[in-house]
Image (cartoon, rainbow, N blue to C red):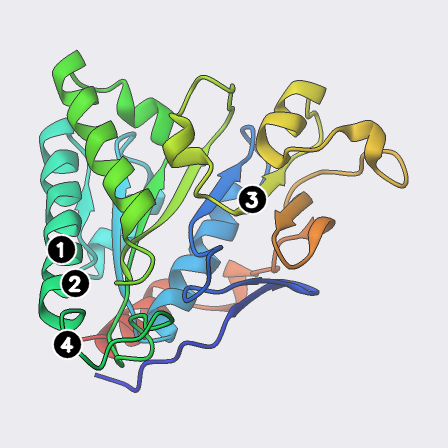
């Protein structure tokens, strides 16, 4: 395995994704055509480049999930697979705490990076659609497991979350999950006032100028930057064999 890199992942200007911080969990909202898949592909590739483990949930069976599955990244698609993958992340999280955080040498600021441990990042693409893909009992199980990861995984690094959706209402996700996602990204041109507020916690009228969004463009909210304009990293897939690049990056995480 390559050396593990805990350096924050650059997203745009001063907006960075720091897996070791309180803002490790990400909420990405983007209506159809907003550039979500391209940004997710970049974020997933950077997780692998940093030497961390990546797992995906893709209940819609999209090309995004198929691509990463083809290079050996675990991808859950059915409700049963989703629950199994979430359970595995929770088990790994609890096992990490039991194995590494029971020492008398542990301090208040100890986390997985200070223990030189590999993180596991879970990307759940279209989480709201995924929660509705099974029975009511399966949905309850998914939410309970997701809550455990949202609330408890940060210090262990096992089950750090990237949750995406095309829309978001205040009641769509339990507050115990959504409130833990302190890196928030909103992409797209036609964004309602309600979606802007639910995603970012602010109002359009608070912007210094009129709302500017589009494909790969919108706004971000993080503890360090506050509300700021955002533009996703540009990736020209016609100029690079992205699958071969992912294979190379994936090989370095074993």
Find disc 3 in the rendering and name its residue.
184
Alpha carbons under labels 1 and 4: distance apart:
15 Å
- The front one of 167 and 102 is 102
- The front one of 6 and 132 is 6
Instruction: First in sequence, mark 3 or 1: give its number.
Output: 1
Going by the image, does 35 lie left or right of 65?
Answer: right
- The front one of 218 and 136 is 136
Camera-near label (4 vs 2) is: 4
Alpha carbons under labels 3 and 2: distance apart:
27 Å
Task: Point out the residue furthest to the top here.
Answer: 136
Quadrant for the N terminus, please: bottom left
Determine contact: label 4, label 2, CB under 8 Å: no
Camera-near label (4 vs 3) is: 4
Alpha carbons under labels 3 and 1: distance apart:
26 Å
Where does residue 37 sit, x and y in percent of width and height? 47, 45
Find disc 1 in the rendering and name its residue.
94
Q: Residues within 10 Å of mark 3 (few under 14, many from 20)?
A: many
Task: Point out the residue furthest to the right here.
Answer: 209
Q: Secondary structure at mark 1?
A: helix
Determine contact: label 1, label 4, CB under 8 Å: no
Where does residue 116 sit, x and y in percent of width and height? 27, 81
Quadrant for the C terminus, please: bottom left
- The front one of 149 and 109 is 109
Q: Residues within 10 Å of mark 4 (few under 14, many from 20)?
A: few
Where does residue 176 sit, x and y in percent of width and height? 38, 33
Q: Secondary structure at mark 3?
A: strand
Find disc 4 in the rendering and name its residue.
103
Q: Residues within 10 Å of mark 2 (few under 14, many from 20)?
A: many
Tell me, for residue 97, which label it has, or none: 2
Where does residue 150 sit, x and y in percent of width and height? 33, 44
Q: Secondary structure at mark 4?
A: loop
Instruction: First in sequence, mark 3 or 2: give its number.
Output: 2
């Amino acid at each position: 395995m390559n050396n593990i890199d805990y350096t924050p992942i650059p997203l745009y200007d001063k907006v960075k994704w720091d897996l070791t911080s309180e803002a490790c969990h990400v909420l990405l909202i983007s209506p159809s055509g907003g550039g979500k898949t391209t940004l997710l592909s970049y974020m997933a590739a950077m997780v692998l480049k940093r030497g961390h483990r990546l797992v995906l949930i893709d209940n819609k069976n999209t090309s995004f999930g198929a691509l990463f599955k083809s290079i050996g990244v675990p991808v859950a698609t059915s409700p049963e697979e989703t629950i199994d993958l979430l359970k595995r992340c929770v088990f790994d999280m609890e096992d990490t705490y039991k194995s590494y955080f029971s020492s008398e040498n542990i301090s208040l600021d100890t986390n997985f990076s200070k223990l030189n441990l590999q993180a596991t990042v879970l990307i759940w693409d279209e989480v709201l659609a995924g929660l509705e893909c099974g029975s009511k009992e399966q949905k309850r199980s998914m939410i309970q497991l997701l809550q455990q990861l949202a609330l408890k995984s940060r210090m262990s690094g096992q089950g750090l979350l990237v949750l995406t959706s095309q829309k978001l209402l205040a009641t769509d996700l339990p507050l115990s999950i959504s409130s833990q996602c302190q890196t928030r990204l909103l992409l797209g041109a036609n964004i309602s006032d309600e979606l802007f507020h639910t995603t970012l916690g602010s109002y359009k009228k608070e912007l210094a100028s009129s709302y500017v969004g589009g494909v790969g463009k919108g706004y971000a909210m993080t503890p360090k930057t506050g509300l700021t304009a955002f533009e996703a990293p540009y990736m020209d897939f016609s100029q690079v064999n992205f699958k071969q690049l992912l294979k190379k990056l994936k090989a370095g995480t074993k």
